[in-house]
Image (spheres, rainbow, N blue to C red):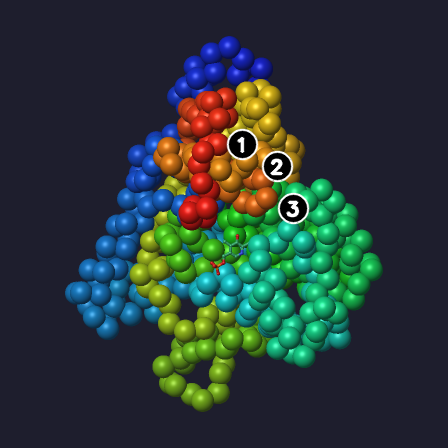
Amino acid sequence: MDPGFDPDRTHGDGVAYARERDAADPLAGFRERFDVPDDLYLDGNSLGPVSDAAEQALDRAVEQWRDLGIRAWTGADPPWFWYGESLGDDLAPVVGAAPDEVVVANSTTVNVHTLVGTFLDARGDRPPGVLVNELDFPTDHYAVRAQLRQRGHDPEEHLHVVESRDGRTIDEADVVAALAEHDVGIVFMPSVLYRSGQLLDVERITDAAHEHDALVGFDLAHSVGVVPHDLSAHGVDFAVWCSYKYLNAGPGAVAGLYVAERHFGTRPTLAGWWGHEKATQFEMRREFTPADSAGAWQTGTVPVFSAAPLAGSLELLDEAGIEAVREKSLALTSYLVSLVDKRLAELDCSVGTPRAPEARGGHVAIEHPEAERVSATLRDRGVIVDFRPPNVVRVCPAPLYTGFVDVWEFVAQLRELLETGAYEDVDAGGEVT
Ligand SMILES: *Cc1c(COP(=O)(O)O)cnc(C)c1O
């Protein structure tokens, strides 16, 4: 994809160029639909801000609780009883799946438990080995290890970890090589690495896993809502993601999951009545009959107030279009990378994110030896980024509410701070990340 960015044009009056880009941005109007808490909120890959649509959907849910009480389960609009399924239908195009293959349920960590557990049980003749990588978000490893131990498989023996060559990225060739080297039943990888922002080649990893008769799942936490996916067409077996990052559904919002249609009917590890076949759920049978859809991986009652904001924020995403969001995201991150090169390299900053657009998610890792104190100082000034150890300032210009002038302003502020050494007296200790 061509982000339509000509780096040479950033020479000269930088902010004029940024203004020009904002003026030509077809998504610029979405900014006023969000209530962004700070001057420069560049942390939407940790917690997206509230939008008018999300807040209205939440208000509507409260009203329906007040007005309908228990009747809202079937009488609300949309009926809460099918909320997980109906939100799954809305999300399906965002991840490239059929409506039945997606449901909204649980938290991301719980979904890793239930899906990895399910496919460890359903692996047939495949070995119990699970292939992950060294740079994963820690909760994914905790859950996979727990599921292995649960089945009497020692993680030291059966958890295989692809190492990074540079501490930032994972080479897909190393994933392929590990598949040849170890007995792997399940490959479980992130789409985007949470620290460096590398976007892995989902299709290549899926094909390689299947060539070795392994199943493959992805954690899309750092890509869903900013990078389009094609899970069904690529033949991915299962996926999980959270809704409070680029999907802007609010803190702890209910998560999402995908299971390929060919696996419908497989027994979920964390079976619960909310995953029962809907038509007979209220017959209260003792035997569990899983829904014939991804809905089977729901566990208990859908948390309506943690689901409603997602309905609103998905309306905005649908209006914008995930392809347009990706295009603007790449334009913003390309612009940021070029400004770091031009204006911050001499001040000890470097870019830790892959430069190839097809290998980049929605955020940029700026490396600096004092990243922790620099991040804390930026936050003190209302420039919200986060620090990830050991040396990364993580910057996310989320496309629905961030413009080119914001990126320019961020770089100007960071430059000023590094030039004056204003971060040197700051105690990074108390910072909440
Ligand atoms: C944010 C994130 C999670 C969060 O999991 P929760 O269960 O929502 O706390 C999990 N995995 C990855 C890769 C993440 O980025």
On the image, the x and y values in percent for residue 154 come to: 70, 73
Farthest right residue in view: 181
- Figure check: 91 above or below 332: below
- CB atoms at circles 2 and 3 under 8 Å apart? no
Farthest front residue in view: 425
Q: Mark 3 points at which residue?
A: 200
- CB atoms at circles 1 and 2 under 8 Å apart? yes
Quarter holding the N terminus is top right
Residue at screen point 48% across, 87% down: 287
On the image, the x and y values in percent for residue 300 come to: 41, 73
- Figure check: 17 above or below 170: above
Type of amino acid at the residue the image marks with label 1: Thr
Which mark, residue 333?
1
- CB atoms at circles 3 and 1 under 8 Å apart? no
Badge 1, how many Cα within 10 Å: few under 14, some, many 20+? many
Type of amino acid at the residue the image marks with label 2: Thr
Residue at screen point 42% across, 52% down: 244
Viewer-side residue, 269 vs 314: 269
> Across the whole image, how many numbered discs are drawn on residues?
3
Q: Earlier in the sequence, mark 2 or mark 3?
A: 3
Farthest bottom residue in view: 286
Which mark, residue 287?
none
Q: Mark 2 points at which residue?
A: 353
Viewer-side residue, 298 vs 112: 112
